[in-house]
């Protein structure tokens, strides 16, 4: 089972692929509120995945890819309809991200590092060492984020965060947030089913 998990960490999905030439023609993502929302969600992800290295892909995912995942969500609550519609507009454009996240750990905007296939030396490791190697691979995955959708008052937000650490490792989720005096917080009382994927 451990070998199967390690092998699944090797290849990243295609929807995020982009050439260097295409990257230079994309607009910069400049939304301060968007970076605040995404920072809240990424900080939670860092705790869950226990990241040692925080790597964020410098491009937002393609709109087609995001629309396919979002189409699986059950009915979006009325409170977030306007933000959801704005999200649909935002994802029509792919953006280049900037170093404007406020994270608990140092991060880098960088393409994913491909995991190498298990070597004979890897297979010869003890069970404990092999487990450590797998945990290290999981913690060194890459985050993908989309431009955030907001309502007119910018007090409701719809956001997307994906974490990929291999073909069968990670998740892709939509989040619904409210802004209060404390700042942006996930609306945990909002139950929207099938609004993401677990790999």
Image (tube, helix red, strand yellow):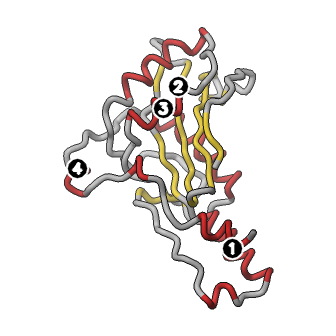
Q: Could you tell me which residue is drawn at 58 percent across and 46 percent down?
A: 42
Task: Residue 90: give its label.
Answer: none
Q: Is 176 placed left or right of 190 in the picture? A: left
Q: Residues within 10 Å of mark 3 (few under 14, many from 20)?
A: few
Measure the alpha-carbon separation of dots 2 and 4.
Answer: 27 Å
Q: Which residue is mark 4?
A: 22
Q: Position of residue 101 (x, y in %)?
A: 48, 46
Nearer the viewer's eye, disc 1 or disc 4?
1
Residue 80 vs 55, above or below: the answer is above
Q: Which residue is mark 3?
A: 68
Q: Could you tell me which residue is drawn at 46 percent across and 24 percent down?
A: 149
Task: Residue 71: give its label.
Answer: 2
Residue 33 visible here: no
Q: Could you tell me which residue is drawn at 53 percent across and 67 percent down?
A: 10
Q: Residues within 10 Å of mark 4 (few under 14, many from 20)?
A: few
Q: Residues within 10 Å of mark 2 (few under 14, many from 20)?
A: few
Q: Are marks 4 and 3 in contact (CB under 8 Å)?
A: no
Q: Are marks 2 and 3 in contact (CB under 8 Å)?
A: yes
Residue 130 visible here: yes
Q: Earlier in the sequence, mark 4 or mark 3?
A: 4
Residue 74 vs 15, above or below: the answer is above
Nearer the viewer's eye, disc 4 or disc 3?
3
Name the secondary structure under disc 4: helix
Q: Which residue is mark 1?
A: 3
Measure the alpha-carbon separation of dots 1 and 3.
Answer: 31 Å
Q: Earlier in the sequence, mark 1 or mark 2?
A: 1
Q: Position of residue 151 (x, y in %)?
A: 48, 15
Measure the alpha-carbon separation of dots 2 and 3.
Answer: 5 Å
Q: Position of residue 143 (x, y in %)?
A: 52, 51
Q: Position of residue 91 (x, y in %)?
A: 38, 30
């Amino acid at each position: 089972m451990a070998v199967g998990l390690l092998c699944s960490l090797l290849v990243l999905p295609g929807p995020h692929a982009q050439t260097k030439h295409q990257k230079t023609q994309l607009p910069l993502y400049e939304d301060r509120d968007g970076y605040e929302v995404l920072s809240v969600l990424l900080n939670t992800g860092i705790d869950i995945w226990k990241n040692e290295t925080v790597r964020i892909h410098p491009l937002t995912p393609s709109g087609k890819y995001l629309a396919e995942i979002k189409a699986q969500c059950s009915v979006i609550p009325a409170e977030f309809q306007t933000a959801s519609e704005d999200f649909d507009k935002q994802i029509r454009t792919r953006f280049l991200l900037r170093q404007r996240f406020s994270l608990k750990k140092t991060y880098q905007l960088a393409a994913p590092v491909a995991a190498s296939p298990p070597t004979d030396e890897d297979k010869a490791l003890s069970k404990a060492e092999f487990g450590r190697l797998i945990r290290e691979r999981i913690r060194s995955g890459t985050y993908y984020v989309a431009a955030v959708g907001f309502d007119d008052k910018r007090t409701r937000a719809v956001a997307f965060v994906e974490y990929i650490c291999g073909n069968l490792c990670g998740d892709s989720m939509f989040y619904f947030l409210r802004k209060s005096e404390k700042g942006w917080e996930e609306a945990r009382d909002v139950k929207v089913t099938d609004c993401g994927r677990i790999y």
